[in-house]
Image (tube, rainbow, N blue to C red):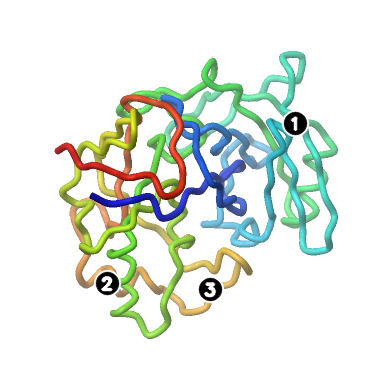
Amino acid sequence: MTRIAALYIHPVKSLHRIEVPGLDLEPWGPKGDRRWLVVDPEGKFMTQRQHPAMARILTALEGDTLHLAGDSGAVLILAPPGPDAPLARVSVWKDRDIEARDAGDQAADWVSAFLETPCRLVYMAAPESARPAEFGSVSFADGFPLLVTNTASLTDLNDRLDQPVPMERFRPNIVVDSDTPWAEDGWRILKIGSVELELVKPCSRCIVTTIDQETGAIPVPREPLRTMTRFRHQPGGVMFGQNALIRRGGAIRLGDRIECLA
């Protein structure tokens, strides 16, 4: 038996996280998670992979209202675009015709000025616009509704690093407090109260794990990826955490007990 150690949402894909006391899990992901997206002028999604400064844009939610804050203290407050807002067709990886609503010129100008490159901000009114994915539907997340990580696995990784990294580098939704490193490789069905999750695929990690999520800088080039390559390389990449589906939704909270059913 284990417990939930931390919970996170990322309202805008690739911007700063929010640590929360609870999550409402819907089939396409946690409520409020990755419903907003920054895109280039052609509608292609933008992430920290190419724009590490995205990590420095702080996010907050008041109900459905999004607050963004930059280094200077300038704040942008946005309600979700309504059905009359301009329709945008955007792409995330191989999905090239995702329906979203444009958040307007003020939002585009604010984010463009911060990132020093032209871009726009769009919103997905899930579930109507949720993307078909390999195992169901998803918001603007890379490919799965949920990412689950394990505290003991991070401890094992940090024991191998000269400079430890925090869990935030891996941008999870649910952090499990466990005594067994890499136990998540064998988890398949997790039950949290009435909620049921199915862990379906290990998460292949990218250069974002090298970016300090507070500063947007890369403190140690190639780490922790280089170290993980030595012992966590599997077909498909270097793995940390498990992608999960929400088989039975509902509310979960920090400290909730987790039971592994399979």
Q: Which residue is mark 1?
A: 103
The circle drawn on residue 218 is 3
In the rendered structure, which disc, 2 or 3, sits on the residue that comes first in sequence? 2
Q: Are marks 3 and 1 in contact (CB under 8 Å)?
A: no
Sort mark 3 into few (<14), some (14-19) or many (20+) by Cα contacts within 10 Å. some
In-front residue for pair 88/5: 5
- Measured as percent of width and height from the top left, residue 255 is found at 41, 49
Q: Which kind of residue does numbered mark 3 sit on?
A: Ile
Q: Please state the total of marks drawn on the protein image.
A: 3
Image quarter in which the C terminus is found: top left
Quadrant in the picture for residue 240 = bottom left
The circle drawn on residue 259 is none
In-front residue for pair 192/31: 192
Q: Which kind of residue does numbered mark 2 sit on?
A: Asp
Q: Is residue 186 left or right of residue 244?
A: left
- Measured as percent of width and height from the top left, residue 28 is found at 44, 27
Q: Which kind of residue does numbered mark 1 sit on?
A: Ala
Q: Is residue 78 above or below residue 179?
A: above
Quadrant in the picture for residue 101 = top right
The circle drawn on residue 156 is 2
In the rendered structure, which disc, 2 or 1, sits on the residue that comes first in sequence? 1
Gap in angstroms between the C-alphas marked 3 and 1: 31 Å
Secondary structure of the residue carrying tag 1 is loop
